[in-house]
Image (cartoon, rainbow, N blue to C red):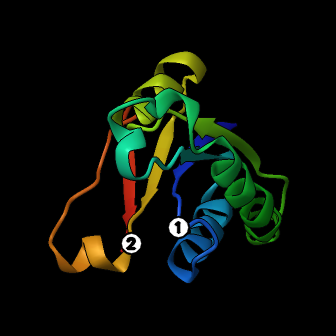
Amino acid sequence: MERVLLVACRTAAGDALLEAVRRRATASPCEFTLLVPRPCHGLHRVVDPEDHGWREAEAVIGSACPVLSKAAGSAVAGMVGSHDPVAAVEDALNLHGFDEVIVSRSRRAHRAGCTSTCRARSRAWVCP
């Protein structure tokens, strides 16, 4: 069974990610894990980013995992990652060995032309 990492924060329960999870779940047997990088605001980004954002990320996981689980047809696990999204993904891939990654982007990032792809072995999907 393939292991799929979902990377999202504000868009964790969004329609685009839910549709991507539905499509992926029907493609072949897999299990999903939602990774939410810890958000850091203001001076905490510089002064003490490791100490902040835990509750906010856990709240996203608590609200998104049940909705994602329904879309997947099976339980979706959740994990809180580093405040640095790239480091959070690298840590998840290196420590847990996911086979695929689905990255959910905000509409603002999509409009700005930001790309957010990463590779796990061979497949990466990006949700607009």
How far across and down, in percent of the image, does residue 106 sit?
39, 72
State the residue at coordinates (77%, 71%).
67
Vertical position of residue 64 compared to residue 39: above or below: below
> Residue 124, how many percent across, how many down?
37, 49
Q: Amino acid at mark 2?
A: Ser
Q: Amino acid at mark 1?
A: Arg
Q: Residues within 10 Å of mark 1 (few under 14, many from 20)?
A: some
Kindly tell me whether residue 29 is visible in this rendering.
no
Q: Is residue 52 visible?
A: yes
Front one among 125 and 82: 82
Work out whether residue 13 or residue 96 is closer to the camera in this orientation and state it.
13
- Residue at image location 58% in from the left, 62% down from the top: 24
* Residue at (52, 70) in percent of width and height: 11
Which disc, if any, is residue 10?
1
Q: Nearer the viewer, residue 24 or 45?
A: 45
List the residue tagged with mark 2.
106
The answer to which quarter of the image holds residue 95 is top right
Side (left or right) of 25 relative to 35: right
**Left or right: where does residue 63 sit relative to residue 27?**
right
Dot 2 and dot 1 residues touching (CB under 8 Å): yes
Disc 2/disc 1 C-alpha distance (Å): 7 Å
Which of disc 1 and disc 2 is earlier in sequence? Answer: 1
State the residue lying farthest toward the top: 95
